[in-house]
Amino acid sequence: MHDLTLEDLNDEAIAAYKHKVGATDTAALLRSRGLYLGTGNRTGVTQAGRLLFGRTTPVWSYVRFLQYRGMTVETGTQSNLSEDIRIEGTIPQIIDATRELVAEKLGSVIRQVPGGRFERIPLLPEFAWFEAIVNAVTHRSYSLQGDGIRVTLFEDRLEVESLGRLPGLVRVQNIQNARYSRNPHIARVLADMTGYVRESTGGIRRMFEEMRRHGLPEPVYGISGTGVKVAVYTLRQR
């Protein structure tokens, strides 16, 4: 990415970021966040800089939203695929657009709440499914360029699949407590800009807590063929 210059970045997005963190020097801010190399033999925008602020973004950086009728994937003449939507842009744009789309598609149900009243409530607690999406976009392996992140909605669950194995000493068994960040520069900027990313393990622990609080099964993490998959089960199964 070092052949890209500051002119290849979105001025308005960077200006908003500068204002958010109270910075005055654009180049110094981007260097301090690992988004731009401006000294020595290697100069130019880094991959993280392009992914977060690029005027154009890599074709392999996207979320693919799939929705199926039923609880399994059927193919051929029995295909039950009802939606296939590709979401592109910078990482902040992808996160916001995916959040809006999933909230629309997920829907809600009428359920009796304490006190005997009936209220319309989301099929899933938003924090749980949105944290799964933010983690996938933030911590995917961007060195793997053959596919995007997959967000798949079935009648009984939402699955989020991210490219790349769990890093370091992180395992499915310790994911609530292990601290890691495959892309620390991306995580830092998203924490600055949006507050979506928490540079600790608190977000994943809260996912589990939110699911239990709503009487739902805990998130199910597993290793897929290309990376990591998490499933959160909806109220429809109850």
Image (cartoon, rainbow, N blue to C red):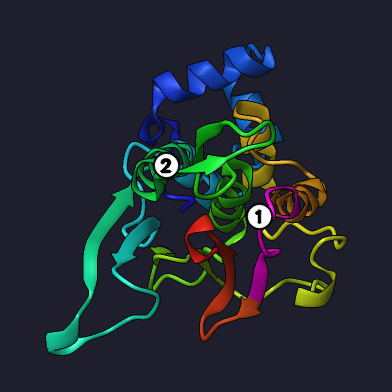
Give percent across and percent down for residue 178. 86, 63
Q: Amino acid at mark 2?
A: Ala
- Mark 1 surroundings: few (<14), some (14-19) or many (≥20) residues within 10 A: some
Is residue 215 magenta-colored? Answer: yes
Q: Which residue is mark 2?
A: 103
49 and 195: which is toward the camera: 195
Residue ID at (66%, 55%): 183
Vertical side of 14 occupied by 72: above or below = below
Q: Earlier in the sequence, mark 2 or mark 1?
A: 2
Q: Is residue 35 magenta?
A: no
Residue range of the region highlighted in magenta in the rendering = 212-221
Q: Is residue 100 left or right of residue 159?
A: left
Counting from the top left corner in percent of width and height, residue 4 is at 41, 44
Q: Position of residue 51 (x, y in %)?
A: 47, 46
Give me the residue at 19% from left, 80% from top: 79
Q: How many marks?
A: 2
Q: Which mark is residue 183?
A: 1
Q: Is residue 154 above or below residue 199?
A: below
Up/down of 46 relative to 218, above or below? above
